[in-house]
Amino acid sequence: MAASVLLACGLNEQKLPGFVHISEESNVDGSFLISCILGQRLRISNAGTLLICLQHHYQHYFNAGMRLGYNSNIFLGKTLNVIDVLSDMAQQGLDCKWLRSSDELTLTEQLIEDIRTQLANNYANRTSYTILIDNLSILFNLGASKLHVQQFCQSLAALAKEHENLTVITKLSNSDIHQLTDDNVAKLGNVRIQVLRLKSGVFREVDGKLLIERVLDEGSYACEQSRKEVLYKVNDRNVKIFNPGEIGVKV
């Protein structure tokens, strides 16, 4: 189930690290991690969550949550708030603030302002608060530059340091294509989870590999003891985790 994924990633505790980055390699889908983390945070009493939908709209995460055994609508507008960029663009078209050019705010500046507003309204009332951003690479598609995305993530990391019980979790797809940006964002955080293809190619029993790295000293990735590899398989209603030695596959 989803609990085994969170346990493997070290994200099953009530208090999470301040900044977690998920690097998603090309031709793999790490969206299941966002859904698993979202479900875990919603189950914690009086813990607030802000979901920022860039790759998938909110309805996708509602459907995924129902398959994983939780109903996010119960928490919507209470402990769960959503900035649904994708739905805003679909409903409002070119009038959407995410698509309008502005002399005052760039796309990423507008997004960080909206995040700050959500924090100002909701953080003080919660025992902890988690910001989930489902795919930073969509910002490139919307016209943001690499510098803008990097500055956006630096602002998020600063928020996590300013607020004691705040966790920011970001995901970047095509991390092998945007390698420099991906590495720079990962260095802002405490935990990096890489969603990788199998070297042996397609395998029926396994979808891919998770490489979990934890920072021992700020600014540098730690030695071999901080690295952990697991294999994963996403089914319709659960996510299975395997140790590499359990299945005869080259990872």
Image (cartoon, helix red, strand yellow):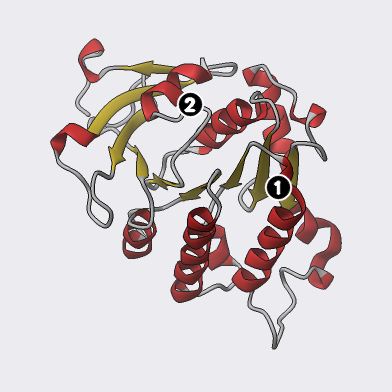
Q: Is residue 85 visible?
A: no
Secondary element type, mark 2: loop
Decide if residue 106 is on the left or right side of residue 220. Answer: right
In the rendered structure, find residue 13 and report the number of the disc placed on it.
2
- Where is residue 7, by image quadrant? top left
- Is residue 226 found left or right of 133 in the rendered image? left
Residue at image point 32% right, 37% down = 197
The residue at the point 48 percent across, 71 percent down is 151
Q: Secondary structure at mark 1?
A: helix
Q: Which residue is mark 1?
A: 124
Amino acid on which disc 2 is placed: Glu
Q: Which residue appears at 50% of the width and 33% of the height?
A: 15
Residue lying at the far bottom in this picture: please name it: 103
Cα–Cα span, label 2 and label 1: 21 Å
Lower sequence index among marks 2 and 1 = 2
Residue 222 versus residue 66 in the image, above or below: below
- Residue 157 place in picture, x, y as percent: 47, 58
- Residue neighbourhood size for the residue with mark 2, other residues' Cα within 10 Å, grouped as few (<14), some (14–19), many (≥20): few
Q: Count the marks: how many?
A: 2
For this orientation, the residue located farthest to the top is 246
As drawn, the residue found furthest toward the left would be 224
Q: Nearer the viewer, residue 3 or 16?
A: 16
Across and down, in percent, residue 26 comes to 39, 47
Residue 54: x, y in percent?
A: 63, 53
Report x, y in % for residue 171. 48, 48
- Amino acid carrying mark 1 in the image: Ala
Q: Is residue 33 above or below residue 235?
A: below
Drawn side of residue 111 relative to residue 155, left or right? right
Q: Quadrant of residue 96?
A: bottom right
Give the left or right position of residue 45, taking residue 149 as reference: right
Image quadrant where one finds the C terminus:
top left
